[in-house]
Image (cartoon, grey):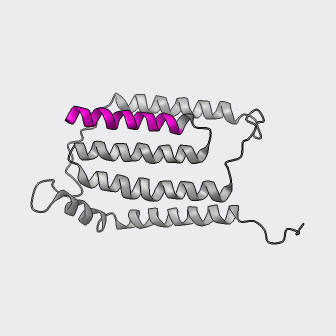
């Protein structure tokens, strides 16, 4: 049964990921992203990582994809564009160069050893309490500033998207 769940969820994950990349309609791409995220959540459940599965569904499929759909609908980017017109000359070669640099950095980092031997900054993994309780205690005590700064940045991004997409009320009526 484990292999069957893995095969179905893995196939759904790959199909959804290909749908995101190959879909020409941004709404369909966002819905394929939802399918991919739900399939990954099933894979987390199969590994008995129920907290990660819940976070995957609530945070990613619930909030982030809804935000994507909101911005897509607000900006109206479902119109087709001419990709042969390059408004910023040289952006594609620079993008290719940046991609190659990132790939080189990833390959360079893959060759190194990540074991530092340093003590954990969030406390020992063993001891009393569940892993979720330890994660919450660490997140909402030691890392609360980073957590709150991230939430503020997300709110600023949404407000900025709404401000950019808002139509001017001074447009003449037909």
The reply, left or right, for residue 24 in relation to residue 171 is left
Q: Main secondary structure of the magenta part?
A: helix
Foreground residue among 45 and 99? 45
155 up-or-down from 12: above or below? below
Point out residue 89 in the picture as x, y percentages from the top left corner: 76, 36
Is residue 22 highlighted in magenta? no
Q: Quadrant of the N terminus?
A: top left
Left or right for 113, reference 88: left
State the image coordinates of residue 113 (x, y, percent, origin top left): 28, 33
**Is 15 one of the magenta-colored residues?**
yes
108 to 49, vertically: above or below? above
User: Over which residues does the magenta segment extend?
Assistant: 1-20
At horizontal 78% and vertical 68% (from top left) the residue drawn is 168
Q: Is residue 25 above or below residue 99?
A: below
User: Residue at 20% of width from left, 36% of height from top?
Assistant: 2
The residue at the far left in this view is 127
The residue located at (34%, 34%) in the rendering is 10
Camera-side residue of 79 and 85: 79
């Amino acid at each position: 049964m484990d292999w069957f769940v893995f095969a179905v969820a893995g196939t759904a994950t790959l199909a959804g990921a290909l749908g995101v990349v190959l879909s020409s309609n941004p709404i369909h791409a966002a819905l394929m992203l939802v399918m991919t995220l739900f399939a990954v959540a099933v894979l987390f459940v199969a590994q008995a990582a129920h907290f990660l599965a819940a976070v995957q569904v609530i945070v990613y499929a619930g909030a982030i994809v809804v935000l994507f759909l909101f911005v897509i609908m607000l900006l109206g980017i479902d119109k087709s564009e001419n990709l042969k017109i390059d408004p910023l000359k040289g952006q594609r070669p620079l993008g290719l160069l940046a991609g190659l640099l990132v790939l080189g950095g990833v390959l360079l980092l893959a060759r190194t050893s990540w074991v530092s031997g340093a003590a954990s900054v969030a406390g020992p993994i063993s001891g009393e309490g569940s892993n979720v309780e330890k994660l919450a205690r660490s997140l909402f005590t030691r890392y609360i500033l980073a957590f709150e700064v991230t939430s503020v940045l997300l709110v600023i991004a949404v407000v900025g998207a709404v401000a950019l997409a808002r139509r001017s009320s001074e447009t003449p009526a037909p």
